[in-house]
């Protein structure tokens, strides 16, 4: 049995808790509004870059080989036939690197590579990693796109535009990850060479990351 006195006590405690939650809500709403306004005001300063010197990959000698499932685990072999090189470019001349160029030389079916880099927010507002654009460097510059909704499957790429897929690229996570001003994120992807590759050939493609102001992010396919 709850007597009247205790009941009043319970009621007043509940009231205080509800008041507290409401105040928290108000503070939170205000904080959100402030961030949003700042984001809007400074929306012209959304920028990001590949961190110079941050690009790393596995094959610096003996080749790696995908076993059984593309992108899932690998073992090293005792031969050095294929090789990978990466170069960063500043395509718009604003002083930061925005394109990662990947070249695969003399690779063969099930050759495997893992490439990682750091992405840095060098703009003024928080950003989120939105999508990845891959372009083949052959005549057609075929355009592929990966976003958060496609993370569960590999992206098959026809690097020489001959109608046969040459590699499958598995992108690591970090879509939708928020980067505050000056923050960086590690991002990586794997490459598995497919049966359709032509032996003794060099294949090149480019990777561009597209980030977006934090409050404009949608996980689905970009419009
Ligand atoms: Ca830039
Ligand atoms: Ca090698
Ligand atoms: Ca640039
Ligand atoms: Ca091909």
Image (tube, helix red, strand yellow):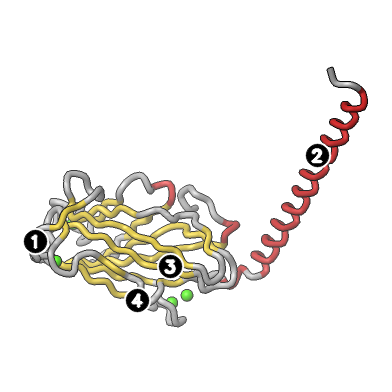
Residue at the spot 51% in from the left edge and 68% down from the top edge: 183
> Distance of mark 1 from mark 3, alpha carbons?
33 Å
- Count of numbered marks: 4
What residue does disc 2 label? 18
- Mark 3 sits near ligand 1, with its Cβ under 8 Å away: no
What residue does disc 4 label? 53
> Distance of mark 3 from mark 4, alpha carbons?
11 Å
Circle nearer the N terminus (2, 4):
2
What residue does disc 3 label? 119
Of marks 1 and 3, the one in the foreground: 3
What is the secondary structure assignment of the residue under circle 3?
A: strand
Q: State the residue in front, 159 or 24.
A: 24
Circle nearer the N terminus (1, 4):
4
Circle nearer the N terminus (3, 4):
4
What is the secondary structure assignment of the residue under circle 2?
A: helix
Judge the density around disc 1: few (<14), some (14-19), many (≥20) Cα neighbours within 10 Å. Answer: few
Quarter occupied by residue 205: bottom left
Q: Give left or right: position of 34 versus 73.
A: right
Circle nearer the N terminus (2, 1):
2
């Amino acid at each position: 049995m709850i007597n009247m006195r205790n009941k009043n006590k319970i009621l007043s405690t509940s009231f205080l808790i509800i008041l507290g939650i409401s105040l928290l809500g108000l503070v939170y709403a205000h904080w959100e509004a402030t961030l949003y306004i700042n984001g809007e005001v400074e929306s012209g300063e959304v920028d990001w870059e590949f961190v110079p010197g941050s690009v790393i990959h596995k094959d610096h000698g003996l080749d790696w080989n995908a076993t059984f499932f593309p992108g899932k685990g690998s073992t090293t072999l005792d031969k050095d036939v294929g090789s990978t090189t990466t170069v960063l470019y500043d395509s718009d001349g604003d002083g930061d690197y925005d394109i990662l160029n990947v070249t695969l030389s003399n690779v063969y079916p099930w050759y495997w590579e893992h490439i990682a880099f750091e992405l840095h927010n060098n703009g003024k507002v928080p950003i989120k990693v939105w999508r990845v654009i891959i372009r083949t460097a052959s005549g057609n510059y075929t355009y592929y796109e990966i976003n958060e909704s496609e993370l569960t499957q590999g992206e098959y790429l026809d690097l020489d535009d001959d109608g046969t897929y040459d590699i499958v690229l598995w992108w690591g996570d970090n879509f939708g990850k928020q980067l505050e001003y000056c923050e960086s994120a590690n991002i990586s992807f794997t490459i598995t060479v497919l049966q359709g590759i032509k032996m003794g050939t060099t294949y090149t493609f480019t990777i561009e990351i597209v980030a977006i102001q934090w409050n404009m992010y949608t996980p689905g396919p970009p419009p």
